[in-house]
Amino acid sequence: MASEELREAEEMLQQKENELAEVQRTLEEAVSKKQTVLAEAQKCHDKMDAATALIGGLVSEKIRWTEQISSFKSETDRLVGDVCLLTAFLSYTGPYNQEFRTYFLNLWTKHIVEKMIPISASVNVIDNLTHRSQIGEWNIQGLPTDELSIQNGIVATKACRFPLLIDPQSQGKVWIKNMEKQNQLIITTLNHKYFRNHLEDSVSLGLPIIIEDVAEELDPCLDNLLDRNLLKVGTQYKIKIGDKEIDWNPEFRCYITTKLPNPSYTPEIFARTSIIDFTVTMRGLEDQLLGRVIVTERKELEDERVKLVETVTINMKKIKELEANLLHKLSTTQGSLLDDVTVIEVLNTSKTTAIDVKEKIEVAKVTEGKINAAREEYRVVATRGSVLYFLVCSMTMVNNMYQTSLVQFLDQFDASMRNSAKTHIAQKRIKRIINYLTLEIYRYKSRGLFEKDKFLFVLLMALSIDLRYMLCEVQHGWRVTDDYDKRLLNTFTRVWFHDALFEDNFNFFKGYIVYCFKERDSYISAIDNMLNIDPPQVYGFNSNAEITYQTNTIRSILEEIMSIQPKGATSGTSEVREDRVARQVREMLSKTPPAFDLFDVKQVLIAAGDTSSMNIFLRQEIDRMQRIILLVRSTFKDLLLAIEGSVIMSENLRDALDNIFNARVPTVFKRGSWISSTLGFWFTELIDRHTQFYNWCFISRPVVFWMSGFFNPQGFLTAMRQEVARGHQGWALDQVTMHNDALKVSPEECKKPPKEGVFVHGLYVEGAGWDRRTSRLVESTNKVLFALMPVIHIYAIYSTATKNPKLYTCPVYKKINRTDLNYICPLWLQSNKPPDHWILRGVALLCDVK
């Protein structure tokens, strides 16, 4: 019985174990299926994430790629015209200077357009035929940095014919020797006893060779070489030099140089070689000397410029590598792109890098502009050096022995920077370098001149620094004391005294020519036929200048009439003169602002920071305003008493009575205040000035300042510079200069003050108009004498570099009368026309036009 129960129990246990195993197996299958489903779900989720990332990346890249596709298509369409122009440049422009090269490029572009061949609007030869890193290497190897020299380097290395360099100063030869030095350059001449051996070795071994100092004829053995008349023998090429057949190595390069400044080569030589004019030009030498000056005087600028070029080049190269890698991944990935994680990684890296590089390139453009502007400050040194070099070279026409090499001159130029007195003020330093250089070149050159030629050399030097200097500074300049008058005089000589003056069709203005007769009577007759009154355009003015002249003439006449009127005259009514003045004085006295409580002013300024430069300026202005208010109130009260007979009518009170009757500003008011054409304008300005000072002191600092309302606007701008300098640690005030931007808003639209500097309003431009849309000077509207300027942001920058020469330096005056007493400062305005145009127009900014 017990065994039976045991057996049944064991069977039941086995059954349950089997059931458990089945359930366990079912569970494991379910878990396995679950894991499979979860894995599939995770895989699907990963694919969704990858797809989202891919779509997001491609969407953001779509804009850039679409722009590039459009750009590539446009470039492809214009490729034929661009290639035609660049090929013509390489083939034909080598023998010409920069002026003719530019002329030919413009002429060819015009012909290509006329033939309906697509071409880019502006084809930059240098950017299309080389790159920045290559130019940098050439400069290090001795190629000058000016545009002409870089173009010469392109022709010498890119043209299919071997180059023949017209190189009297040996600059091209030095560059080639440095460039090919590591390639085992062979140096030879046509009359060298081993010339043939040198030539044969270089051709067979593929070595570069330079044939120096050739004359106007070349050795006939070079004909086959220059024409590349190759002979195919089996699988190799040979070339015949003289009576020998030499193995041809395609790595062979040949350079030919001549020191002749103006050689006369045959058409055959022109056809066989790429003749390149490496002769130094005045502009080219100026650019070279500027580079030397910057390396010496502002090495940090040159280092920053070089670093900038390298950074831009590396970034552009990086973008191209990433794009090439991405395109390779996209085109070679097998199956779905979502299965290849590296594609998404490359895409994200490409996108991030492209954004970063784009930002860096934009920053680089801004930085490059600032660096170039700072470099331009030293251009005057380079200009003087270039003028002196060509003056020294011109002495060879006096005597052939007066030879001076460019290397000698550059030594003297560098010495002038080493030996001239040092100073941290850039303008003083520049002046010292120029003076030292001029004197040193005179001393150096005059030592080798005959005594009879020394005076001629001095005269030529004076004329070269040039004729304009003698006209402006020697003959007339000593009479001119105002800097802006001197600038105008210099501009007249620059615009009028040049080579075009002697051309038959030269006109100062329509109908105003340079007379050239053979007889005295003809001159007298021409003078008699001249107009009695010249139009303002003859002198560069706008036609509105005639209105200004006539207005001033009439005003002068009316003032004279008013001054001779009887003092007892009435105004045409029964009201006598004294009663009328008394009524006006009582009315003005009631409107005269009260005097400031100087104790309250002091307490407010102490709380606001009485050591602040702007608060110090405000206190000084309020003190002066206080004296004017007290003077006005006391004068009005005393005048009323004098009219009533209570006090004696003094001379000052009599003057006040006469001037108030004639609506003029009393003499006693003018002392220490401001000039105005009428008493009404003067009194209105008194109220407006008081309002600005009161609000600034007791309410808040103005968002926009009315600069016309200051007694000392120069002090206001100095205080602004001090405020900015103190806000930056390490900024010295003498290294902080003023700059400005003309905004496109009115005072009412300015809700917040600038982060640095000040907003000012109330300025008028005379002699020109103002385009608010482009923020530039434009021609005056007919019969509109003054144009109100928008708000101008005046601020300070930590730089003593000269401003962009394309900006017009516009003087600012307090009143219409442009005198030293009314002069405030210069502001710099944008324009599409050169500054000389606006100088002749007499353009200025005025704080008050009444």
Image (spheres, rainbow, N blue to C red):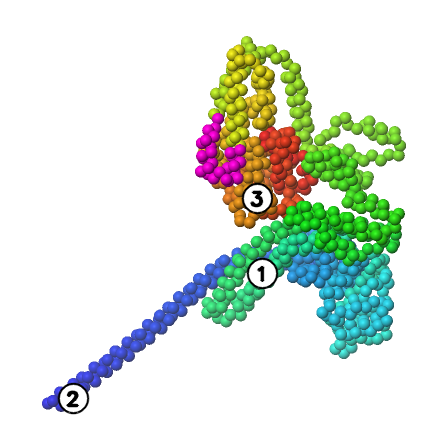
What residue is pinned by disc 3? 796
Judged by its main secondary structure, the magenta piece is helix
Q: Amino acid at mark 2?
A: Arg
Secondary element type, mark 2? helix
Mark yes or no: residue 718 visible.
yes
Q: Which residue does the numbered mark 2 point to in the structure image?
A: 7
Q: Residues within 10 Å of mark 1 (few under 14, many from 20)?
A: some
Residue 814 position (above or below residue 276): above
The residue at the point 77 percent across, 48 percent down is 439
Point out the stretch of residues depicted in magenta. 595-620
Q: Which residue is mark 1?
A: 315
Name the quadrant of the N terminus: bottom left
Badge nearest the viewer, 2 or 3: 3
Alpha carbons under labels 2 and 3: distance apart: 108 Å
Work out whether residue 103 or residue 301 is closer to the camera in this orientation and state it: 301
Q: Is residue 607 magenta?
A: yes
Q: Looking at the picture, how far across and down is residue 826, in whole percent?
A: 62, 38
User: From mark 1 to mark 3, how far is it between C-alphas?
Assistant: 33 Å
Residue 322 among magenta residues: no
Q: How many marks?
A: 3
Mark nearest the camera among 1 and 3 is: 3
User: Residue 608: image x %, image y %?
Assistant: 46, 38
Q: CA distance from mark 1 to mark 2?
A: 87 Å
Q: Amino acid at mark 3?
A: Ala
At label 2, counting other C-alpha atoms closer than 10 Å, the crowd grade (few under 14, some 14-19, many 20 or more) is few
Give the answer, above or below, for where 773 lies relative to 335.
Answer: above
